[in-house]
Image (cartoon, grey):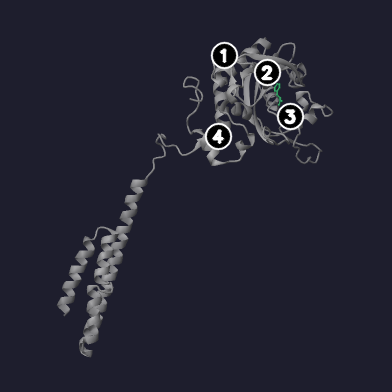
Amino acid sequence: MQEQIASLKAEISAQIAAADTITALEDVRVATLGKKGSVSGLMKNLGGMSPDERKVMGPALNGLKTEVANELAARKDVLESAELEARLAEERVDVTLPVLDHPQGSIHPVSQVMDEIAEIFANLGFDVAEGPDIESDFHNFTALNIPEEHPARQDHDTFYLKPDADGNRKVLRTHTSPVQIRTMLSKQPPIRIIAPGRTYRSDSDATHTPMFHQVEGLVIDKDTHLGHLKGTLEAFLKAFFEVDAVTLRLRPSYFPFTEPSMEVDVQCSFEGGSVKIGDGNDWLEILGSGMVNPRVLENCDLDPTVYQGFAFGCGIDRLAMLKYGMNDLRAFFDGDLRWLRHYGFRALDLPTLAGGLSR
Ligand code: PHE
């Protein structure tokens, strides 16, 4: 009997060593320690033995059972860590590899349009400037020739923050124009910048959201004139809408920070239910602009007898709606993945003029 146990032990050890998967090892366990297994079978025989036999065989069989269980457990450890190693090796991701044909994310239309605008203006020699969303009253209004009692303050539906100890209230900037001020205060001309970013007004319907996006443009030099403004806007809109030509209409308007001021319309057609920019019988108002008011230059310590310039401000969300055919601005900020995927642009695919902006 002792010999039988020894040879069974040797046989089982060999099987355990030979099992090269968790499943194969489990088969060995069932065949030995399972209810109908070989070791369990021997244990059952204990009942039919004489007390003396049992005294010897009991510990021997229990010893066999324990050894087999230990060997199974040890082998299981080895196989499990080998399996984990293999999986890690197989599922390893090299994050330094370029994303090929299966990017997971997509670019929000607002980001796409901002990138397109930056690309167009970079080609015209403009830098991208930035300013804070929480702005001082001075930068957002006063320096832009909108003093406290000015009616234009009411037009802006401003979000005010709680006043500080000195009674100064910060605002959520109502336009990107304060970046004009920050740029002129920190840089000497010639200045050529665009400033894309978030803007805020207390307003909400299909074409207005309390947070929206604008891009500001500012050029200051010694001999800048209205022709430069018109030429720049034409070059921008032609490139942005990816058409061969655009016709612009400059309508006299009023902004406290520009003089003269004009609203710019682009010729378009609404035939067939969608807007076509470039030609047609209709006009679409697209941005506000003008020559920088001499008082604004003075507020920024620039001599208006030496320097002039132009500025413009344009709603980015509206540009995106026009170019990509969206009709409800609120969808921009719902965060609905289906909408994002529908309009979403390929991640890491930066627009270039040479490659075609939107492709
Ligand atoms: N800041 C103006 C607006 O938000 C737009 C504008 C910018 C007009 C620059 C003229 C010059 O309506």
Give whichever of 338, 78 is nearer the camera: 338
In the drawing, does residue 257 fall left or right of residue 331?
right
In the drawing, does residue 55 fall left or right of residue 98?
left
The residue that disc 3 covers is 140
The residue that disc 1 covers is 245
Q: Is label 2 or label 3 in front? A: 2
Total tally of numbered discs in the picture? 4
- Location of residue 69 with respect to 233 vertically, above or below: below
Q: Which quarter is ligand 1 in?
A: top right
Q: Are marks 3 and 1 in contact (CB under 8 Å)?
A: no
User: Where residue 153 sits in the image (x, y, percent)?
Assistant: 79, 29
Looking at the image, the residue that sits furthest to the right is 149
Task: Identify the disc placed on residue 108.
Answer: 4
Per the model, the C-alpha gap separating discs 4 and 1 is 27 Å
The residue that disc 2 covers is 264
User: Where residue 42 sits in the image (x, y, percent)?
Assistant: 22, 78
